[in-house]
Image (cartoon, grey):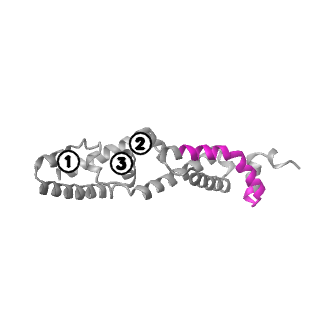
Amino acid sequence: MRSLSEMTDNELITLSKADDQEAFACLLGRYSSMIHAKASAREHLSGCDVDDLSQEAAIGFFNAVKSFDPNKGASFRTYAELCVDRVLVSAVRMYLSQKNRPLNDHRELVEAEMMGNTLTDDLSASSGNPEGRIFEKENIGRLTEAIASRLTELEKTVVEMRLRGFSYEKTAKLLGISVKSVDNAIQRVRKKMKSFQTD
């Protein structure tokens, strides 16, 4: 009988699905560099702990082994990479939402680059006394909360990442979407903010 290291991925997957832990360990060993590389890439982009991301990636890999169907035409490597990517994107989104509570806790939204500071400049110009400034800060806080309530989860996440200094490219890669999707989300946010200004 051939050793596990001589078996194909599909043979090891069949054994793994039958709860052969040694076969799964062999398969995991084959793909450990891919799993680690994907986790490390997300760590550099998001600031998440690489060990946590590696564990999430391993869970994605385990799910890939359990759900892989060789009759669907894709290679296991392609399918496993897709499963790992999806798990990592979800983990990073969860991390960012927990760490930064998108927008609802941020007063910087109105001052963000998307507005070009026009609204805050207008409000600041309206009064020069200390009481007026306190009133303006309260209004900006209420305005920020009202705008945030109109945004989708994707829009909130994209804005949060832009506020943290991520480029369009890094934001797209981290969220597993296209740069165009990031730009579209930003454009929708701008329109919502402008429409709110005119309401």
Name the residue rendered at 25%, 41% in the picture.
116
Number of residues whose C-alpha sits closer than 10 Å to that of mark 2, classed few (under 14), some (14–19) or many (20 or more)? some
What distance separates the C-alpha of mark 3 from that of mark 2? Answer: 10 Å
Q: Position of residue 125 (x, y in %)?
A: 13, 46
Placement of 182 over or under 152, stated as above or below: above
At label 1, which amino acid type do we have? Thr
**Relative side of 11 to 110, left or right:** right
Whichever of callouts 1 and 3 sits on the residue coming sooner in the sequence is 1
Is 40 within the magenta? yes
What distance separates the C-alpha of mark 1 from that of mark 3? Answer: 18 Å
Mark 3 lies on residue: 159
> Residue 28 got which mark?
none
**Relative side of 196 to 101, left or right:** left
Mark 2 lies on residue: 166
Name the residue rendered at 31%, 46% in the picture.
188
Whichever of callouts 2 and 1 sits on the residue coming sooner in the sequence is 1
Whichever of callouts 3 and 2 sits on the residue coming sooner in the sequence is 3
**Relative side of 88 to 5, left or right:** left
At label 2, which amino acid type do we have? Phe
Q: Main secondary structure of the magenta part?
A: helix
Q: Give the SS element for disc 1.
A: helix
Which residue ends up furthest to the right in the rendered image?
Answer: 1
At label 3, which amino acid type do we have? Val
Give the magenta range: 16-42
Mark 1 lies on residue: 120
